[in-house]
Image (spheres, rainbow, N blue to C red):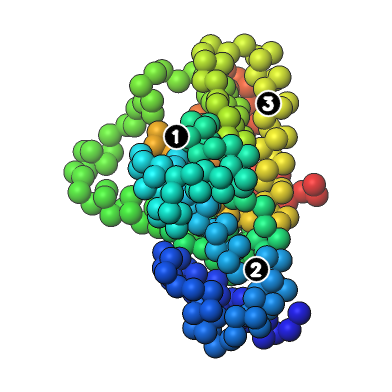
Amino acid sequence: MTVTAVDAFADFVDHLAEALDDHDLTAEERAARLHFSRFHFDRMIRSVAGEPPASLRRRILLERAAYRMITTSAPLIDIAVEAGYGSHEAFTRAFTRAYGAGPAAWRRRPGHIQIEAPSGVHFQPPGSLRLPARDQVTPMDLLTRMVEHHVWLTGEMVRLAERLTDEQLDQPIVLDVDEDRQTIRSLLSRLVGQMGMWNAAVATRDYDWSVEEHESLSSLRERLAVEGPTFLGHVRDVVAAGRLDDTFVDALCEPAHVFTYGGMVAHVLTFAAHRRTLVALAFASHGLDELGWGDPMTWVAEPA
């Protein structure tokens, strides 16, 4: 594999991102835009991507079509035309080969939008594609971004505080974070359920919210034994593969939302920290202070 081939592939991905909807452009014209003959260009792209440029483009268009199906109410025929297909039948055949189900059936119960590909280049919602190695989010980047968010949010809170009177600034805070009254039981159930909810989203399956209604401690232990390692496994996998900036579609939301794995981790840790603190304070009020504030500072410094 030559540097020229790798560079040509990067240029091709950039070209696709800009001209994905140019269905009238021929394969020869795409190659010519990058200053290659069709034959030489196809050979180079296949050597790097593991698939011909035309196949890669069709796959990206199908992935975008799958994304459109679960994030919009557009008719399937409109989505088919946008993907470059002249008829609903042709689109149905191509989609079924790629996803194992017809468009209508898949839309009712969607799965992952990315089709397996050796290059790792996929449609990146809401409307682009990129090389996997570009702008890769590392664990250190995520940690830095979370600290940056902390500093920014603290500054914004100070800014908003300037609108309040001294009396309002010094008024005791009464915690009422949800419509329902929070208890140790409900907070612990949500801590476990938050991981279970995201495990379900990643696996594209439903989450049973009813389990959190006055959940027993035995149920909490059983669920944590499953959901905790599963969620940790997701995090370890995406960190090891350098995929924190990869996106997935949470089709369980209404409407569906697109998240990055890194964003999911930051979300879980942020809101879980709030709930853990409330539980620690409640334990202390009952004389159970062996966990203190649950501060991770010394825990993370210890060997795994």
Mark 1 or 3, closer to the camera: 1
State which quadrant residue 211 falls in: top right
Disc 1: which residue: 253
Q: Is residue 141 above or below residue 187?
A: below
Tell me residue 31's x, y (percent).
55, 80
Q: Is residue 27 visible?
A: yes
How packed is label 3: few (under 14 Cα within 10 Å), some, or many (20 or more)?
A: some
In the image, 153: left or right of 299? left
- At x 60%, y 20%, the residue is 287
Mark 1 or 2, closer to the camera: 2
Q: Is residue 125 visible?
A: no
Mark 1 residue element: loop
Question: CB of mark 2 within 8 Å of CB of mark 3?
Answer: no
Which amino acid type is shown beneath numbered disc 3? Leu
* Residues at marks 1 and 2, CA–CA distance in whole angstroms: 35 Å
Q: Which residue lies most toward the bottom here?
A: 35
Disc 3: which residue: 224
Nearest the viewer among 173 and 69 is 69
* Residues at marks 1 and 3, CA–CA distance in whole angstroms: 23 Å
